[in-house]
Image: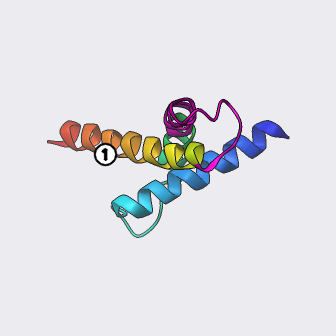
């Protein structure tokens, strides 16, 4: 059940990152949302929580870090995909 919750949370964070950066098409790329959400949440959420002194508990700093991490991962993903097409 925890794994499903983490995937759902990552998917929501990744979708939020795509909405913040602007969608490339008419809909959200759910594959990118899941990957960016999970990777961004792990890296950004962990770093923000540790820097804020919250430890590994769920706090607003971890959620903000998750969104920032997902935005960075989504931007890098789009940039690398754009370079391959050119």
Q: Is residue 50 magenta?
A: yes
**Does residue 82 appear to the left or right of 32 in the view shown?**
left
Residue reaching furthest to the bottom? 26
Q: Main secondary structure of the magenta part?
A: helix
Q: Is residue 23 magenta?
A: no
Q: Which residues are magenta?
A: 40-60
Image coords of residue 8 (percent x, y)? 69, 50
Q: Determine the residue positioned at 36% across, 65% down.
A: 25
Q: Determine the residue positioned at 46% across, 66% down.
A: 27
| Colour setting | rainbow
Which quadrant of the rendered structure holds the C terminus?
A: top left
Residue, disc 1: 78
Q: Mark 1 packing: few (<14 Cα in 10 Å), some, or many (20+)?
A: some
Which quadrant of the rendered structure holds the N terminus?
A: top right
| Position of 46 relative to 72 (above/below) | above
Q: Nearer the viewer, residue 32 or 48?
A: 48
| Position of 86 relative to 43 (above/below) | below
């Amino acid at each position: 059940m925890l794994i499903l919750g983490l995937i759902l949370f990552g998917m929501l964070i990744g979708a939020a990152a795509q909405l913040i950066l602007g969608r490339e098409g008419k809909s959200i790329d759910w594959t990118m949302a899941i990957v960016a959400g999970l990777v961004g949440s792990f890296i950004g959420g962990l770093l923000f929580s540790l820097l804020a002194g919250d430890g590994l508990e769920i706090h607003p700093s971890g959620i903000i870090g998750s969104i920032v991490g997902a935005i960075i991962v989504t931007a890098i993903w789009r940039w690398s995909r754009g370079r391959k097409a050119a």
